[in-house]
């Protein structure tokens, strides 16, 4: 009797975001080499959603990279971040714990924000020691994320939610877009450059408000200087 051949279903591509290493590095504001180290299957921190040989990252991986950069900026070692990721991954049963739970750092350890069962106050838990402390002011980065029922990150607003730019994995593969119109920021920015900075002309061509073009230009220029 011949055994039936088994096939491995490829990971879903729609609705999860698709970024190259170069794109992820630009959006996070680090050099591509750092992204490659952080996603390395042998010594890295971020677990891969797509096959390793593709060098393609998902939206949740991108959010994880943002948090790793934040922790590193706070003075944490990669070893400490890796340990916290392992602990938090087991605790929250997630391959992407930094994207599932909101994290903060004091430069020495990592905390996950939780809702207190006893009160309606937000508390944070030291995922390495299990010690809870009250947190009065959340880091500005948290204001840039939308969460599904306070768990999985759904959208990222690089200019905060008061801005127009959003990364939404279910829209344009997670590329930066103008939230109102859905036009990619890079398209608007390149059009402005090609037309000697004529914002009004580009707005007319793409049938978008001038504010959308201006926001796209500001975003793309900030990305160019982020690293």
Image (cartoon, helix red, strand yellow):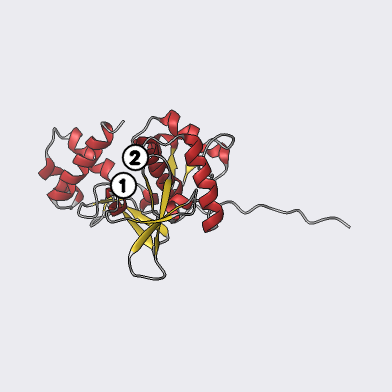
Q: Residue at x 35, y 39 (%)?
A: 28
Q: Residues within 10 Å of mark 2 (few under 14, many from 20)?
A: many
Q: Where is residue 202 in the image (x, y as percent from the top left)?
A: 16, 44
* Discs 2, 1 touching: Cβ within 8 Å: yes
Mark before the other along the chain sequence, 2 or 1? 2
Quadrant of residue 224 within the rendered picture: top left
Please name whichever residue, 14 or 221, is drawn nearer the observer in this view of the structure.
221
Q: Where is residue 87 in the image (x, y as percent from the top left)?
A: 54, 49
Tell me, yes or no, if residue 221 can be seen here.
yes
Q: Where is residue 128 in the image (x, y as percent from the top left)?
A: 50, 48
Q: In this view, does 162 lie to the left or right of 33?
A: left
- How many numbered marks, from 0 up? 2
Label 2: state its secondary structure.
helix
Front position among marks 2 and 1: 2
CA separation in Å, label 2 and label 1 = 9 Å
Q: Where is residue 5 in the image (x, y as percent from the top left)?
A: 76, 53
Is residue 82 positioned above or below 101 on the image? above
Give the quadrant of the N terminus. bottom right
Q: Is residue 201 left or right of residue 37?
A: left
Q: Which residue is drawn at 39% across and 71% down?
A: 118
Label 1: state its secondary structure.
loop
The dot on residue 113 is none
The dot on residue 176 is 1
Q: Which residue is drawn at 40% across and 34% down?
A: 22
Q: Is residue 197 left or right of residue 102?
A: left
Q: In this view, does 201 lie to the left or right of 6?
A: left
Q: Residue placed farthest to the right in the image?
A: 1
Residue named by callout 2: 27
């Amino acid at each position: 009797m011949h055994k039936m051949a088994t096939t491995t279903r490829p990971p879903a591509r729609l609705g999860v975001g698709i970024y190259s290493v170069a794109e992820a590095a630009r959006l996070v504001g680090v050099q591509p080499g750092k992204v490659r180290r952080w996603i390395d299957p042998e010594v890295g921190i971020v677990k891969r959603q797509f096959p390793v040989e593709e060098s393609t990252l998902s939206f949740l991986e991108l959010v994880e990279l943002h948090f790793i950069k934040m922790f590193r900026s706070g003075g944490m070692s990669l070893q400490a971040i890796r340990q916290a990721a392992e602990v938090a991954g087991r605790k929250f049963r997630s391959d992407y714990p930094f994207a599932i739970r909101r994290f903060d750092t004091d430069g020495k350890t990592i905390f996950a924000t939780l809702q207190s069962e006893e009160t309606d106050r937000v508390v944070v838990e030291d995922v390495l020691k299990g010690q809870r402390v009250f947190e009065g002011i959340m880091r500005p980065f948290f204001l840039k994320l939308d969460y599904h029922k306070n768990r999985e990150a759904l959208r990222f607003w690089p200019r905060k939610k008061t801005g127009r730019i959003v990364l939404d994995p279910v829209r344009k593969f997670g590329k930066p877009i103008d939230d109102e119109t859905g036009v990619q920021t890079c398209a608007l920015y390149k059009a402005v450059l090609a037309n000697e900075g004529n914002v009004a002309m580009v707005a007319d061509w793409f049938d978008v408000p001038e504010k959308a073009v201006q926001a796209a230009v500001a975003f793309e220029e900030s990305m160019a200087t982020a690293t």
